[in-house]
Image (spheres, helix red, strand yellow):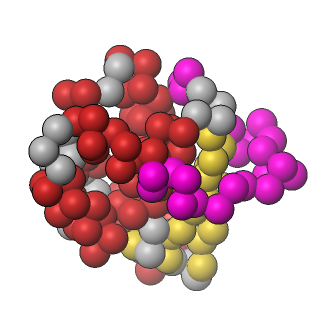
């Protein structure tokens, strides 16, 4: 149930033969992201459980299960910025209901990230996914209230 943008990343990863090329591609994805404004780098947007500094800011349009989920994010580490870009491709543009239905570990495993990230980076990636799911769940609950 991955987005078209994520499918493009998965396809590109399929063409890259070794992890070093994939690693560089992840960094390039992060470099292409617009930086997050300083005023959004606050404790309320910070993701806990990451070794690096990570911020995720939701942008949800609409209400209830049909509300469209997008987010912006940033990190002080280039590889983590790239992981945020991958998560943006995976989740942005989906409804909050669809966000909650995404099997992120399965989708990310298609990229081989689980095999090549350090345990700290893997934990941070899981923390980012959990933060995104929490934001989507909160939007869903607020729309139902």
Position of the N terminus, as image quadrant, is: bottom left
Residue situated in front as seen by the camera: 126 or 118: 118
Q: Is 7 one of the magenta-colored residues? A: no
Q: Is residue 100 visible?
A: yes
132 to the left or right of 2: right
Compared with 44, 12 (above or below) is below
Compared with 34, 133 (above or below) is above
Tell me where residue 118 appears, x and y as whole percent: 35, 20
Tell me where residue 47 appears, x and y as whole percent: 61, 36
Tell me the residue at 42%/26% (across/down): 121
Position of the C terminus, as image quadrant, is: bottom right
128 to the left or right of 5: right
Tell me the residue at 62%/40% (across/down): 75
Instruction: Find the residue positioned furthest to the right.
Output: 39
Tell me the residue at 53%/45% (across/down): 81
**What residue span does the magenta drawing correspond to?**
28-51
Tell me the residue at 78%/44% (across/down): 41
Compared with 95, 133 (above or below) is above
Residue situated in front as seen by the camera: 94 or 37: 37
Image label count: 0
Q: Is residue 97 visible?
A: no
Tell me where residue 48 appears, x and y as whole percent: 60, 29
56 to the left or right of 28: right
Tell me where residue 63 appears, x and y as whole percent: 57, 78
Residue situated in front as seen by the camera: 22 or 62: 22
């Amino acid at each position: 149930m991955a987005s078209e943008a994520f499918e493009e990343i998965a396809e590109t990863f399929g063409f890259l033969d070794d992890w070093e090329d994939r690693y560089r591609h992840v960094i390039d994805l992060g470099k292409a992201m617009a930086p997050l404004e300083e005023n959004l780098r606050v404790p309320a947007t910070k993701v806990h459980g990451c070794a690096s500094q990570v911020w995720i800011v939701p942008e949800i349009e609409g209400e209830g299960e049909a509300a469209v989920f997008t987010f912006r994010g940033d990190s002080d580490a280039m590889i983590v910025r790239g992981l945020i870009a991958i998560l943006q491709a995976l989740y942005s543009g989906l409804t909050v209901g669809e966000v909650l239905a995404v099997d992120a570990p399965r989708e990310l495993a298609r990229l081989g990230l689980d095999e090549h990230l350090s345990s700290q980076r893997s934990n941070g990636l899981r923390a980012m996914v959990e933060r995104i799911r929490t934001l989507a769940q909160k939007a869903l609950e607020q729309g139902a209230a």
